[in-house]
Every structure is written in C-alpha cells, then in structure tokens.
C-alpha cells in the first residue's frame, strides 16, 4: 500500500544530487539498509514503500521507510534514483497524521534528543552508503558534500 505524503506534515527535507553516480541507486539503497541494520538502533526497521502524491491519479515513487517504535508518529523516507547521470537522494522526515487528523505540536527534551539521534543515525548510514558507491565508482569520497546539521531541526519542531 502506498503512503500519501501529502496527508502527512513534512517537517524536514533534504535533497542532493551526485554527479556520475546515477547507475548506483540500487547499490546505494542496499548499502544503506545494510549499514542502518548493523547500527542496532532501538526498535528501528527499514522497509521498501511507495510514496504517492494526489489521490486518484498522482504519481508514485519507491522509497525506503525508516521507522522506530519509540517515535511512532514519525517516519523518514529516503529515496535514491538515477536522475540522468546523477544519483538523486531525497530524505523527508514526516509526522504521520493522527486518527482524527491532529498533529503533535509540542515535544519534550527527550523526544527532541531521540528525534535528532534518529535523523542523524539515518544520515550517517546515508553517508556510509554514499562513500561506498563513490569508492566503487573510482571517485574520491572525500570530495562528496556530506553535511548535515541535526540542530537545524529545532527551527522546525523545537
């Protein structure tokens, strides 16, 4: 079943393209899943899911869905696809809509810490997978733009 991203609140998004790595989208996803599972994060699972837009005639794309039991209202969706010769990576942190359509509007300090750790952990696995595909392609992983600021979340939810 596809998840309609337009019914959720996107609270953080990230997107990058990497020149010359477009043929490595599938390998990137495989390495990401392997790395995040090896991190033994608390009650975290990764599944392949379809994100869709619109209701009847909107498009769909395949994403990895990362979820954690203790952060049940949140999901990270990670997409990897070829965009020409580029590898396009997109990541969304969303709050799932509640049963009555309500949204969580306040977070305690521990929830913010867990949320930051959750997102930063996904990013470190993304970085590890990206370095691996770059190295396989003969590119210097040191030249990749691997920047992430989990504190930037505070602008959106803190």
Image (cartoon, helix red, strand yellow):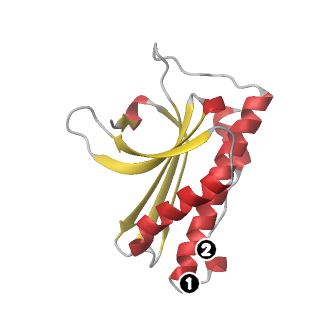
Q: Nearer the viewer, residue 2 or 40?
A: 40
Q: What secondary structure is marked by label 1?
A: loop
Q: Position of residue 150 (x, y in %)?
A: 70, 48
> Upstream in the sequence, badge 2 or badge 1?
1
Q: Residue furthest right?
A: 109
Q: Nearer the viewer, mark 2 or mark 1?
A: 1
User: Mark 2–mark 1 contact, CB under 8 Å?
Assistant: yes
Q: Position of residue 28 (x, y in %)?
A: 49, 66
Task: Describe residue 47's horizontal placement relative to residue 135 as left or right.
Answer: left
Q: Which residue is pictured at 67% across the width and 78% down the height?
A: 142
Q: Which residue is pictured at 44% across the width and 64% down the height?
A: 88
Q: Which residue is pictured at 73% across the width and 37% down the height?
A: 114
Q: What secondary structure is marked by label 2?
A: loop
Residue 102 position (above or below residue 139) = above
Disc 2: which residue: 144
* Mark number displayed over residue 100: none
Q: Is residue 68 visible?
A: yes
Quarter holding the C terminus is top right
> Quadrant of residue 23 in the image?
bottom left
Residue 85 position (above or below residue 147) = below
Task: Describe residue 17's horizontal placement relative to residue 123 as left or right.
Answer: left
Q: Is residue 123 visible?
A: no
Q: Position of residue 36 (x, y in %)?
A: 61, 54
Task: Describe residue 32's horizontal placement relative to residue 118 as left or right.
Answer: left
Count residues near mark 1 (Cα–Cα under 10 Å), then give few for <14, some for 14-19, many for 20+: some
Q: Position of residue 85 (x, y in %)?
A: 38, 76
Residue 151 position (above or below residue 32) = above
* Mark number displayed over residue 139: 1
Task: Describe residue 152's horizontal placement relative to residue 6 as left or right.
Answer: right
Q: CA distance from mark 2 to mark 1?
A: 9 Å
Count residues near mark 2 (Cα–Cα under 10 Å), then give few for <14, some for 14-19, many for 20+: some
Q: Residue furthest left?
A: 57
């Amino acid at each position: 079943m596809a998840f309609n991203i337009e019914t959720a609140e996107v609270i953080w998004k990230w997107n990058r393209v990497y020149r010359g790595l477009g043929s490595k989208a599938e390998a990137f996803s495989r390495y990401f899943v392997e790395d995040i599972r090896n991190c033994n994060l608390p009650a975290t699972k990764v599944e392949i899911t379809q994100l869709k837009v619109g209701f009847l005639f909107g498009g769909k794309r395949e994403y990895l869905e990362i979820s954690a039991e203790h952060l049940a209202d949140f999901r990270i969706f990670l997409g990897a696809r070829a965009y020409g010769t580029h590898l396009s990576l997109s990541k969304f942190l969303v709050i799932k809509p509640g049963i009555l359509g309500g949204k969580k509007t306040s977070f305690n300090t521990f929830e913010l810490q867990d949320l930051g750790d959750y997102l930063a952990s996904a990013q470190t696995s993304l970085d590890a997978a990206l370095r691996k595909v770059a190295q396989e392609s003969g590119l210097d992983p040191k030249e990749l733009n691997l920047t992430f600021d989990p504190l930037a979340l505070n602008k959106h939810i803190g």
